[in-house]
Amino acid sequence: MRSWIVLVVVTALTAALPLAGNNYLLRLATITCMYAVLAQSWNFIGGLAGYPSFATAAFFGLGAYVSAILQVHGLPSVAAWGCAGLIAMLFAAFIGGAILHLRGHYFAIATLVVAEMLREIVNTTPHFTGGGMGLNLPIMRMSVGAQAQFFLFAMLGLSFLCTATAILVQRSKLGFGLRCIQQNEDAANVLGINTYAYKTAAFSLSGVFVGMAGAIYANWTNYIDPPDVFDVLLAIKPLVMVMLGGLGTIFGPAIGALILIAFEEFVWRNFLTIHAAALGFIIVVLILFLPNGIVPLLRERVARRGASP
Amino acid sequence: MIYLQIAANGLVLGGLYACIAVGFSLVWGVLNVINILHGTFIVLGSYIAYFAYVHAGIHPFASIVIAGGVLYALGHAIHAGIINRVIAAPVLITLTLTFGLDLILNNAMLVAFTADYRSINLARPLGTLEIGPVFLPGDRVAAMALALLLTILLWRLLRDSRIGRAIVAVRMDREAAALMGVDVKRINAITFGIGALMAGAAGALLSIIFPISPLNSATFLGKAFVVCVLGGLGSVPGAIIGGIVLGIVESFGSYWFGPEHAVTISFAILLVLLFARPRGLVGRRGYE
């Protein structure tokens, strides 16, 4: 129950942002929501089931391209976003069926390669996808301010949906089964959990919202090209965010997204040429010194302070 | 006749791919770490060869020694200082850590050398080799021969030297090796260093063939993935076979479907293979 209250309150507060903030603030909030969706989605397969998935970039790019191509052919935006989510989910189920029998390193490599392969396919079919030239989306007839609000609400709605799903899954049989798989897959199998079906479900869940986020992103930026939407960093950042916020928790991914955005804005403003190295530095520090993330660390501090006086 | 030429091109490419992948395969097999840094190590080796040639006139083939030495030192230091701290962690942690290190090193190279593509134009190229109906550029053939020679040297090192036997022992059973008096931490660092050394040497060889830029590192890493999965993890002969298969498949794929599809084809093969035969074409346990 507490999770639902927190979710509704945070969503309502974010939705009230246009009353107070300028477009820059709205842009930051929109990216934060997008990152929260990516992190939360990765959490299904990576945090709950413990499978090291790097497929986020593949789902994101796929969603962006499916939606963009449909819109170029005349489908309304919101319908195209829905189709993008559906296709990303089916794609995840299909790919998952092929590679979820792999464990550890082989699974990681397979998921890394999926995004690269999609990128190459887009690059080499220019008559259909625009190839390396990228793809322009139909322009929305809205003022700049209205657009900023529209995309904030779209991403916020998506992150609400995604987090709500996460809460439901964590408390359901599915979530319990996935945690069993993480701890000991063979034992889970012996206990009668259909591990294959559970993993495929988790992988599909990790695809559907990311595909829609990619689709909304494509409309937001009005132009997509393969290096942008299939960027391997899109596959790395979600797990950085989840690690920042704490693995397997409900609001950890969103908190991680907020921390990462704050850090990225700081780096982009001050050290533009080394922003990739700065992200790398965070990763190294995080893994070497904060293996449990920042949130549990803060919680521990608070608990200790509460106990001492 | 054209098929003979394509096969020969593929063979030359394959020898180089084997050399790209063998260090990656060694690190994966022994340390159980997917080293995302590998591609950047290769590019760094290429830059060392480039600057040695431009400023000191050292032939890239001779630079193998310099590039290999520098990369060995770098790899050993990175492992002993950073990676060894989390060596027993799950794949997610170690892979992400090498990814972070790769972001740092690659970004440093972008700042230091810019993203401009550079290439080495040899003052005295070896000319063209003519074997029956097949024509091959002499420098490429020499590079491939050296690449195979290095790969075989590594194989002998693992089989015949004391260090090599220790590395194989750690790969087979970490605990048992430690009980037999092997300093596992030291062997880990040496193995990572050797992986980097092979990357640096491969980079020096590749510098006369491919343009040099930090942006190429992902391409080399992708090749290492495919060769490793094709040949099966952690065997030197596997890497050679995997490399040659990939080289030939890419040559014929480029001929039939157009060169722009070569990467898609190799990745598709990787996925199909992972689906059907995750141990690789000649995969087996043990690194000898």
Image: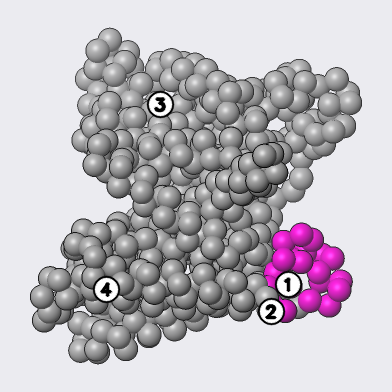
The span picked out in magenta is A173-193
Which of the two discs, 2 and 4, labels the residue nearer the N terminus?
4
- Chain at numbered mark 1: A
Q: Quadrant of the C terminus of chain A?
A: top right
Q: Secondary structure at mark 1?
A: helix
Q: Is residue A50 above or below residue B237?
A: below
Residue A176 image label:
1
Q: What's the distance in space between the residues labelled 2 and 1, CA to CA?
A: 6 Å
Q: What's the distance in space between the residues labelled 2 and 4, CA to CA?
A: 31 Å
Give the residue at x 60% y 72%: A2
Q: Residue type at mark 4?
A: Phe
Estimate how packed mark 2 is, as few (under 14), some (14 to 19) or many (20 or more) residues with alpha carbons within 10 Å: few
Nearest the eye: A9 or A138: A9
Q: Secondary structure at mark 4?
A: helix
Q: Is residue A233 above or below residue A166?
A: above
Name the residue beneath numbered marker 3: B45
Q: Quadrant of residue A271?
A: top left
Look at the image and tell me whether residue A107 can be seen: no
Residue A172 image label:
2
